Image: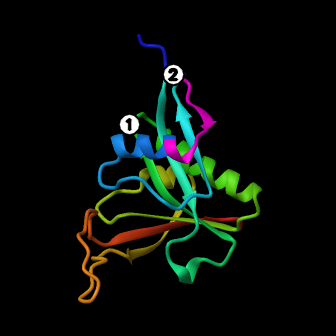
Amino acid sequence: KRKKKMLRREPITLRKANAFIKQHHRHHSSTRGWKFGIAVNDGEKIVGVAVAGRPVSRMLDDGYTLEVTRCCTDGTRNACSMLYNSIWRAGKEMGYRKCITYILKGEGGHSLKGAGWKMVDDNAGGGSWSRKNRKRIDKHPTEKKTRWEITNG
């Protein structure tokens, strides 16, 4: 019988978080926006990271809303839920009243549910950033997303 490894939180720099994200994230690369980040360690190595920043949507950027812009693990059980929970706990202590994140519509959201988050929009975002007068090459999935949030009340 294998001994169960205890997961522990630890601080992380943006540089180290982005290196982990580049190596492990299924469909996104590193992030630019950063307020803070949290890592989860299994006693031997980092098994997941989460990055918190300002909301990407200007309409949601009220100064009291935080967005998890990346949550990435190597597949370690419960690491995702621990990261979402940790970001919210830290954000609440800083005075944030709400935390949001987006996941692809095809993803289940089990980690978010496990951390107490609620799905508030099942048809959010998605699409291409490319425009006729501003061509872009989409390196990310363009499918619709679901928006999840957790609040103080």
Q: Residue at x 76, y 55 (%)?
A: 93
Residue 49 in the image: x percent, y percent?
50, 43
Q: From this view, report whether residue 99 is shown above or below residue 11.
A: below
Front position in the image: 105 or 126 = 126
The N terminus is located in which quarter?
Answer: top left
Q: Residue at x 64, y 68 (%)?
A: 98
Disc 2 versus disc 1: distance between alpha carbons? 14 Å
Whichever of labels 2 and 1 marks the residue nearer the N terminus, that label is 2
Residue 149 in the image: x percent, y percent?
55, 66
Question: Tag 1: Cα neighbours inside 10 Å, few (<14), some, or many (≥20)?
Answer: some
Front position in the image: 106 or 45 = 45
Tell me the kind of residue under disc 2. Answer: Lys
Tell me the kind of residue under disc 1. Answer: Asp
Residue at the limit of the structure toward the top, as seen here: 1
Which residue bears the numbered disc 1? 74
Residue 12 in the image: x percent, y percent?
58, 40
Magenta includes 7?
yes
**Which stretch did the figure color magenta?**
6-15
Do the residues under discs 2 and 1 have CB atoms within 8 angstroms?
no
Which residue bears the numbered disc 2? 5
**From the viewer's perspective, is 15 left or right of 19?**
right
Front position in the image: 51 or 33 = 33
